[in-house]
Image (cartoon, rainbow, N blue to C red):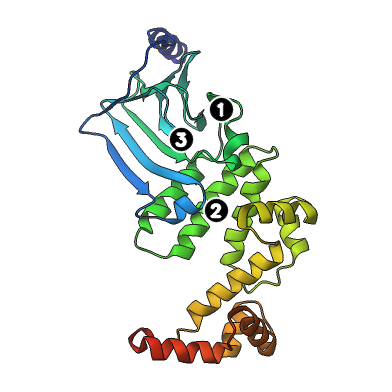
Amino acid sequence: MFKESQNLCKSVMQLFSPKSEWSDKVYLSDECKERFLTNTDIPELGESGYFMAGLAELEAGYEIEREGIGIHTLLVTLEGSGVLITPEFVKELKPYSLTVLPAGLPYRFELHPDFTHWKMVWILLEKLPKWDDLISGGQAVMPFESSEQVWSLMNLLHLEINGRPAYRRLLISEVSRILARFEAKPYSSAIRVQTTFNDIEAQLHHDWTVKSIAERCFISQEQLNRVCKSLYGMSPRSKLIALRMDKATDLLRYEDWAIAMIAQRLGYNDPYNFTHRFRKYFGCSPREYRKRFREADPKTSAG
């Protein structure tokens, strides 16, 4: 019976063929469900090079055709199946596969006629150098063991709309980490550095050093310095200080948090060292900053 099913699948796939003429089309049946993740709802997506994403549970009809758009498209299939048609080939989009569709090339994908549903994540990426390695192989369908992880992370991200920005950054960094792990060529170092600094932002109490950050990115300290200056316009050490100082201004709004407690939360065991660093960065002490903030907007001070 399995052999008959395989033969039937092959015969259905033979009904499809590469195309030479293209147009922009979108069709979704009433049974299809899609949840969108946009830069408007989740601005942290844009910060990390994502244009938009969606969680799709498709039934009874789904067709997308593009002549060639200016962003990269990824399809992560979890259940069911789809069909991809390009100028060069036709392929079934099976569970645990990653479909890569670089910008500027035409394509069409739709629900596989032999399946009643297709559960997948679609991700639109900005045309940035950080994604060059991922799309360097052209239009392709590849095995992808992390489909469930990507679905879960995107689902959590959708639940965090109007939620916590730091947590959203962490979820996005995990998706970027998975994509960076999937490909391992020169530009992936930029993704790894950005992902690592997103992680650092959620763990500022750790004793981070340039050496430990470089090791976590699997690059040398010299390369880390070059990538940081390219991404952020500053050295790794300056980026780390900037993250800690920005977080300090948030924490100082809470009146019942002692300066020493805030210092420890940000990785400064010596509160005097924290005060010195804060004064050098902002031109005033943490205590003075808190006082100015309270005087400027007393209603927003948490007591």
Q: Nearer the viewer, residue 152 or 136?
A: 136
Confirm whether residue 20 shows in the render: yes
197 is higher (above) or lower (below) than 141: below
Considering the numbered disc 3 on the image, is that residue within a helix, a strand or a loop? loop
Q: Position of residue 248 (x, y in %)?
A: 55, 78
Mark 3 crowd level (few <14, some 14–19, many ≥20, 10 Å Cα): some
Write the residue at 44% across / 39% down: 124
93 is higher (above) or lower (below) than 35: above
Residue that numbered label 1 is attached to:
142
Q: In the rendered structure, find residue 34 and report the number of the disc placed on it.
A: none
User: What whole-number distance in Å separates the C-alpha atoms at marks 2 and 1?
Assistant: 22 Å
Q: Position of residue 89 (x, y in %)?
A: 49, 13
Amino acid of disc 3: Ile
Q: In the rendered structure, find residue 71 and report the number of the disc placed on it.
A: 3
Q: In the rendered structure, find residue 173 and report the number of the disc placed on it.
A: 2
3 is higher (above) or lower (below) than 58: above
257 is higher (above) or lower (below) than 17: below
Write the residue at 46% across / 56% down: 44
